[in-house]
Amino acid sequence: MKETSNQNLKYPKATLPINTDGNLKLDSKTANEFGKQFSKQYRFAEPFPHIVIDNFLPNELINKILDLFPSKKLSSDIYFENKYAGLHKKQVLPENCDQKTRNIFYFFNSSPLIQFLEGLTGIKSLIGDPYFEGGGFHEIFKGGKLGVHADFRINEKLNLQRRINILIYLNKNWKTEYGGNLELWDKKMKSKVQSIEPLFNRCVIFNTNPDSYHGHPESLNVPSDVSRKSIALYYYTASEKIYEDNVAHSTMYVARPNDSSKSKVEALKLRFQNYLKDFLPPIVFRALYKVINLIKKR
């Protein structure tokens, strides 16, 4: 097995410009440009498209998230004791947390965050998961691990294709001897290409491909009062085959039986106009629509 050591690799430091005064705010255009500055580095990264960014969230926000990390056991917590498939691991869904925590996770699914991801990855029409399937808060305890794997790719609840993973680490004063590094492996599982320490406010973003193999398969060597904490977020796209499975059309207006003749004529005009829009090539429709408007003005 070939192994690449990059424990001392320096990652870019850049803070997403989120306004934390009151409600969380982020301008969509600014977010998109923020992502684009790293797009080349992301797309050409090995062993699959990814990036590691330190100091990712504003200090006030990341510290608030850590303070809100559930310290008490909830009845809805999901525990994993599946050896290589997840050992001594806990998942906490945002919906089971308090309102402040839920609001932060809702922000992670908002348009500005998606604009950032689209600028970074080049993947268009991304969709956040309102159910946070498999995501939320993750915590792994002493001796715990998660074997190298490629993630599930279809969200069966939403019928969407998973495209992007985000991991944000919440581990202050993390020591190298604790282990718990995120490993990225090549497509043939011959070589470990990246070994990333789960340091506080470090964000790892990567494509969810059939062969984007990752995990932290080494058992955590932490004191009993220390755990490996993170946020996991996943983003999806709808299949373009929807156009094969469904007849697409524009908004179709119809009049009620008792509507006035004027309303019925207007609805008919709109429907005819939208039929033309659906069936004519865009350049022909625009030219025709321009001619119709010129005739109306005479």
Image (tube, rainbow, N blue to C red):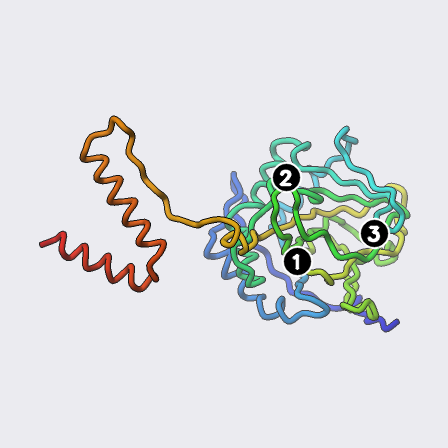
Any mark on residue 295, and which? none
For the residues carrying marks 2 and 1, which lies nearer the camera in this image?
Answer: 2
> Quick check: can you spot residue 247?
yes
Amino acid identity at mark 3: Leu
What residue does disc 2 label?
131
**Cα gap from disc 3 to disc 2, whole angstroms:** 22 Å
The x and y percentages for residue 254 are 31, 37
- Position of the C terminus, as image quadrant, is bottom left
What residue does disc 3 label?
146
Label 3 SS? strand
- Position of the N terminus, as image quadrant, is bottom right
Amino acid identity at mark 1: Ile
Above or below, 263 against 239 in this view is above
For the residues carrying marks 3 and 2, which lies nearer the camera in this image?
Answer: 2
Q: Tell whether 275 sits left or right of 5.
A: left
Q: What residue is drawn where x is 64% and y is 62%? A: 13
Q: Which of 123 and 277 is in front in this view?
A: 277
What residue does disc 1 label?
205
Q: Tell whether 4 sits left or right of 152.
A: right
Q: What residue is drawn where x is 82% and y is 67%? A: 189
